[in-house]
Image: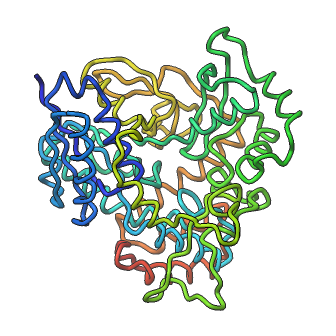
């Protein structure tokens, strides 16, 4: 049997790391037709040991013969790998809460602060160094391998890797599938019966075509009627902005308010849960000081702990992580993420279609730069991953918003390479959710001090 080596980098990741392992163990072909080796790598030994314990327990329970081992050494994990699956983040919620709160203190009206807005730029710069280290290590020890990335900010990081290294890279996100689920709710159909075309920027995409897989019927006229009849406030915190974007531009967006709203200046009115994100009391709490807590992350106002009674038990982030690592064979299921289907298609020469991947445009979305990383449908086979032979056409106004983000991508890359706070300032001032010039300069100085352990050394020049 042929050998196949998969390296999980950032193996301590709860969602994507464990999801990938479950997909690997449930793949019959990867069990019976290859000698599978899985290298688990994380910079935190405790985390990778925890994942290794879970993985060995799970693969043993399924009588799977894969060779699994763990390490904190990146070179060892990647050497001779065929694929690397990457999901890295250091103290995710601790730094994300800074990305969210500090720009807003300085006057930005940003939402979320993960992939768009000033906060996302610090997020990018923190993750860019480690991501490039992974890609450049791959150039040395597994130059023909695919880097399959789940790390955010997805588009910014994948674009940097595609421009600064020779590694084959693809970024994956399930945001488009969330959008299909929303379409299915409006249409009162099974999502499996809905076909789509569309795309844009990761977390800011639009469905340009929707149709019935079984009959070929154009579903946009039916969607238009159903959307008009739907309760105006239903799921408002998640799709209120999506419906307004549809009314304004003619195409329904994905994945939802808190993501799409990162890229536009007027989104705040449509996100009722915004003040709840990383909620804390500034009168009694001093965030990020020694022994202070990281506020709980709230995805939106329609869930999490918000619907619990005053004295009901709720899961915090640490408890959720601990529970995720309690192995239960009955709970092992397919994650519906794309990494393992990609590995199978390339390795076994299948041909599959994927709803969304992030790669350099090369004409897939008309009107956007060729080298900008965009998100749209793709075909995977033994030759690799390529966008489907179609041209997605988005309205001029949407293209304009995405173009701004493409320029921000370039400026952030220049800021990283040139170690320049000035280039970072240029990127922030271009953003739709920018503060004033004076506020932006002060914000950069504070964030560079607050996150100096992880940010590259940047100077005014």
Q: What residue is drawn where x is 36% and y is 29%?
A: 341
Q: What residue is drawn where x is 27% and y is 43%?
A: 58
Q: Where on the picture, by quarter, is residue 214?
A: top right
Looking at the picture, does residue 376 appear above or below residue 240? above
In which quadrant is the N terminus drawn? top left
Looking at the picture, does residue 23 appear above or below residue 76? above
The residue nearer to you, when weighing 329 against 174, is: 329
Residue 418: image location, x then y, percent: 36, 68
Q: Where on the picture, by quarter, is residue 92?
A: bottom left
Q: What residue is drawn where x is 76% and y is 24%?
A: 220
Residue 404: image location, x then y, percent: 60, 52
Residue 353: image location, x then y, percent: 45, 22
Residue 285 visible within the image? yes
In which quadrant is the C terminus drawn? bottom left
The residue nearer to you, when weighing 306 against 172, is: 306
The residue nearer to you, when weighing 104 against 51, is: 51
Q: Residue furthest top?
A: 215
Q: Residue furthest right?
A: 229
């Amino acid at each position: 049997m042929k050998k196949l080596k998969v390296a999980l980098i950032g193996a301590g990741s709860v969602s994507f790391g464990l999801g990938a392992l479950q997909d690997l163990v449930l793949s019959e072909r990867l069990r019976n037709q290859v000698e599978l080796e899985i290298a688990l790598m994380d910079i935190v030994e405790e985390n990778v040991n925890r994942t290794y314990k879970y993985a060995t327990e799970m693969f043993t329970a399924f009588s799977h013969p894969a060779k699994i081992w763990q390490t904190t050494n990146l070179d060892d994990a990647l050497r001779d790998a065929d694929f690397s699956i990457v999901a890295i983040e250091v103290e995710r919620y601790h730094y994300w809460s800074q990305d969210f709160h500090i720009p807003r203190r300085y006057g930005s009206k940003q939402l979320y602060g993960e992939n768009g807005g000033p906060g996302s730029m610090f997020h990018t710069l923190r993750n860019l160094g480690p991501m490039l280290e992974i890609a450049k290590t791959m150039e040395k020890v597994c130059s023909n391998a695919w880097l399959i990335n789940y790390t955010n900010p997805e588009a910014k990081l994948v674009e940097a890797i595609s421009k600064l290294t020779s590694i084959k890279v693809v970024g994956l996100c399930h945001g488009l599938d969330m959008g299909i689920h929303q379409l299915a709710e409006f249409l009162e159909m099974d999502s499996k019966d809905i076909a789509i075309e569309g795309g844009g920027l990761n977390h800011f995409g639009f469905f340009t075509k929707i149709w019935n897989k079984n009959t070929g019927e154009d579903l946009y006229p039916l969607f238009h009627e159903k959307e008009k009849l739907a309760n105006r406030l239903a799921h408002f915190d998640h799709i209120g902005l999506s419906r307004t974007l549809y009314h304004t531009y003619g195409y329904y967006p994905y994945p939802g308010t808190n993501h799409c709203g990162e890229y536009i200046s007027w989104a705040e009115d449509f996100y009722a849960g915004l003040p709840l994100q990383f909620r804390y009391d500034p009168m009694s709490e001093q965030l990020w000081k020694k022994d202070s807590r990281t506020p709980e992350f709230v995805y939106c106002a329609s869930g999490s702990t918000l619907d619990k009674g005053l004295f009901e038990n709720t899961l915090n982030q640490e408890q959720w992580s601990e529970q995720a690592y309690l192995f239960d064979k009955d709970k092992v299921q397919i994650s519906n993420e794309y990494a393992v289907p990609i590995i199978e298609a390339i390795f076994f020469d299948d041909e599959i279609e994927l709803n969304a991947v992030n790669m350099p445009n090369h004409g897939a979305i008309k009107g956007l730069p060729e080298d900008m990383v965009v998100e749209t449908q793709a075909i995977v086979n033994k030759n690799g991953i390529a966008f489907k032979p179609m041209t997605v056409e988005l309205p001029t106004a949407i293209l304009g918003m995405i173009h701004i983000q493409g320029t921000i991508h370039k400026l952030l890359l220049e800021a990283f390479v040139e170690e320049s706070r000035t280039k970072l300032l240029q990127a922030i001032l271009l953003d739709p959710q920018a503060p004033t010039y004076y506020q932006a300069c002060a914000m950069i100085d504070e964030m560079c001090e607050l996150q100096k352990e992880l940010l590259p050394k940047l100077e005014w020049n």
